[in-house]
Amino acid sequence: MKKRFLLITGLVAFVSINAMSQKVFATKSGEISFDATGTCAEAIKASNYQVDTKMVQKTGQIIFSVLIKSFKFPNALMQDHFNENYMESSKFPKADFKGYITNIASVSFDKDGTYNVTAEGILTIGGKSNKVSVPGTITIEKGNPTLKANFKIKVADYVHGSYIGTQIASEAKLALLCKYE
Amino acid sequence: MNKLFIKKIFLASIILSSCKLAVAQDVDLFKSMDEQNKKDKKNQTDYTTATFKTTRLINGQSIENVGAGLLDVKISHRFGSLNKGAYELWGLDNAQMRMGVDYGINRWLMVGVGRNSFEKTYDGFIKSKIIRQSTGQKNMPIAVSAAISAMWKTVKDDAINNYTDRYAFAPQLIIARKFNDYVSLQIMPTVVHYNSVSKSSDPNDYYSIGMGGRLRLSRRVNLTTEYYYRITKQEGYVNSLSAGFDIETGGHVFQFHFTNTQGMTEGSYINQTTEKWTDGGVHFGFNIARIFVINKPKDIKP
């Protein structure tokens, strides 16, 4: 009787430990901004405050999803041109990233601090997919991770139309900030 | 003893196999994202944009509004008629001009003011979006806007006694459909009310129906046409017909066209056109529109 009780308790404990590390951190209000100003007199900058992102603690699996129409520009006409001409956001309403944080094991989620990480995966914008490797940092504060990353992407790899010219920079600078819960 | 032992093994094996399942089924975010995207696609409503390249088709209003917080500076010229020949450089020596500014108050309401050299007329208008064209969960095949313009003729005229005689008003509905990326069409039922007319037997209200459209030639260039059919006809006047090109760059839209009317307000181009295309009474003209940002949207963080 005692033995069976111990066996069951042990197995339940084993299962629950496994379930705990399946913890998924998520937020729907992550922030991403880009700056693609080339020779244009006006700044080509926009921000999106509705990044939908999830991260699995155990495996480092991470996804990001943004609605292109949620990118806000100071100039409404530039926003229209961005959606209509360059992003074709009616055909491709979302941009996403599917990948893994390769060194997730180096992050101690229960200890406050900042850890350098690298995310590798596939970035899809405007229906075009490319493999990317992005360096960033995860800061743990009171058990909640905050992800920060600054990286560049080649505009021609994702944008439609061949009339980019010099007004738009060949590489867009991206800044990502996501506070997970 | 035997039965109890078998029960223990059976129970242990069930627990062990369910543990294996729990460990093997790691959370898969990729699958959940694909499922979410499929769901979102079904629930998405896509509002049609860029039915036309700017807020004027050629002489009259288009279904488009200028964006919120943006100022649209409009300069227009209508030269003399081609049938004047080489001496007048086919009309280029003579020109009527309109300069105006349009402003987007919010996403659906815009205003504009301008001054025309034709009869030294000041004009102002308000245009409001009523229904937007959309596809997806909310399906609306047409877009509808309403506009009303007021015109104040200031040219010296001894025949005009009261200052209110110089005013005219033109309410109109604009109904448009963007069929695809290449073709957009619109119809514009309009009524122009003149406070004063030359003969007491003439009506004060003139009904007409405008029609026009655009055909995309390239990402930056459209072919456009505009025709106003007068329902209330007056002797000696003809319907206005215009055709031209829209060329769009980053912040400018250049419109070049040929038209049989020199007026640029509803009060003049709809009901007071006298020249015919068939007589060479055609005027070359252009509109230039330039967008400036006046008010940035509030939810942009610095």
Image (cartoon, coloured by chain):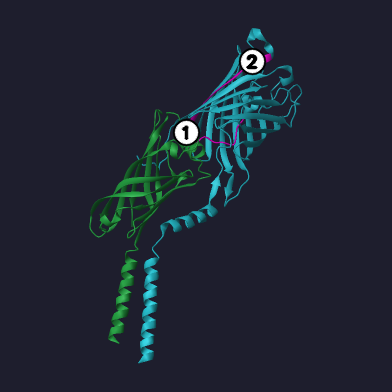
Chain colours: A green, B cyan
* Image quadrant where residue B206 sits: top right
Callout 2 amino acid: Gly
Residue B70 marker = 1
Q: Are marks 1 and 2 on the same chain?
A: yes
Closer to us: A62 or B138: A62
Q: Position of residue B249 (x, y in %)?
A: 50, 28
Extent of the magenta region:
B60-82
Q: Residue at x 32, y 75 (%)?
A: A11
Up-down relation of residue B283 to residue B13 (above or below): above
Q: Position of residue A139 (x, y in %)?
A: 26, 52
Closer to us: A3 or B187: A3
Q: Residue at x 47, y 55 (%)?
A: B34
Q: Residue at x 30, y 55 (%)?
A: A104
The furthest residue to the top: B87
Q: Is residue B276 among the parts visible in the rendering?
A: no
**Pointer 1: residues within 10 angstroms few (<14), some, or many (20+)?**
many
Closer to us: B125 or B176: B176
